[in-house]
Amino acid sequence: MNDLARAKRNGLERAAILLLTLGETEAAEILKHLGAKDVQRLGRSMAELANVSRDEVRNVLGDFTSAVESQTSLGVANEEFVRKVLMSALGPEKANSLMDRIALGNARKGLDALKWMDPRAVADLVRSEHPQIVAIILSYLGAEQAAEVLAVLPDAMRADLVVRIATLDGIQPSALAELDEVMEKQFAASGGAATSSVLGGLRTAAEMVNLMDSSVGTSLMTDIGKSDEALSQKIQELMFVFDDLLEIDDRGMQELLRQVPADKLLIALKGADESFKTKVFKNMSQRAAEMLKGDLEAKGPVRLSDVEAAQKEILLAARKLADEGTIQLGGKGEQYV
């Protein structure tokens, strides 16, 4: 393949070619280490690939390995391949949600463009919309980004929005499509968005609140409790906080620690109580535990915001492992018989 032909494929497309060539199991292992946005972008690119020549495959693989297998999965049931990979990497719930957003054969841009905007920009864009519209948009964005948008919206709006999200029982695809078109007219952006009737609900609301700064989340739950105590209790039962990691069994904790970067664990432990530190040390090798204890003693003061951010990253890793069935979360809302 000549340089001109090579230039037609951008980095994202080349990554998609590589994953399709590797096969479902290997691709899933790679996707496990990527964020949701990257998985979505790669998934969409994988699904949209067409007319991939063997020369292109050889050149892409040449960047990563010296050998190229004679057969590839390219062009064969791309949509089903992507679905299986995402199911293996993220579990059924998140995989189905991401497949809704990958937009196979759908070129709409409005709602999807919000995913690439700064939280403050999204807040400025939606703050004048009807609260029910804002609730639908936040449900579409996903818990992490929605939590950031909620945090910069006026205090008076937050409780009402979370209540609306928690009680949202899906939306007609046609209505979501209309909203998508309205948002697209407000700004120009790249990407696509698929319609989905599975938006909102108690778990979505709980994940959003769970990812907000603790002070903001606590205040928000207090406000919701004042207007609807029963709903507030249901949301709290589905929330999973850092202290709940103590309920993970030793095998699950060992698996979680393998997924957490050492620097993030160090910062997270600066704000953890002694019982949690003891559990972590117990599930490490003696040498690793002694090194971590030494690093903790040598580490100077750490900002509370940095500690909370590190703890949230560990929580996200725990949720991902739970969705995959690798560990069980025994925190709030879980019952065993």
Image (cartoon, rainbow, N blue to C red):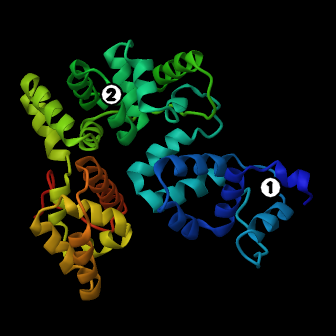
| Few, some or many residues within 10 Å of mark 2 (<14, 14–19, 20+) | some
Question: Of 83 and 250, which appears nearest the observer?
Answer: 250
Give the mark nearest the N terminus, 2 or 1. 1
Q: Quadrant of the N terminus?
A: bottom right
Of badges 2 and 1, nearer the viewer stands 2
Q: Amino acid at mark 1?
A: Val
- Give the residue at the far right of this rendering: 2
Using the rendered image of the protein, determine whether residue 181 is visible from the camera's viewpoint.
yes
Pinpoint residue 269: horizontal percent, then vertical percent. Answer: 22, 64
Q: Is residue 287 left or right of residue 126?
A: left
Pinpoint residue 302: horizontal percent, then vertical percent. Answer: 25, 55
Q: Is residue 150 above or below residue 316?
A: above
Question: Of 238 and 116, which appears nearest the observer?
Answer: 116
Q: Residue at x 65, y 37 (%)?
A: 105
Q: Which residue is mark 1?
A: 52
Pinpoint residue 285: horizontal percent, then vertical percent. Answer: 27, 85
Using the rendered image of the protein, determine whether residue 197 is visible from the camera's viewpoint.
no
Pinpoint residue 300: horizontal percent, then vertical percent. Answer: 24, 62
Marks 2 and 1: CB-CB under 8 Å? no
Q: Is residue 188 left or right of residue 32?
A: right
Q: Residue at x 38, y 25 (%)?
A: 136
Residue 144 found in image quarter: top left
Q: Is residue 130 left or right of residue 163?
A: right
Q: Which residue is mark 2?
A: 152
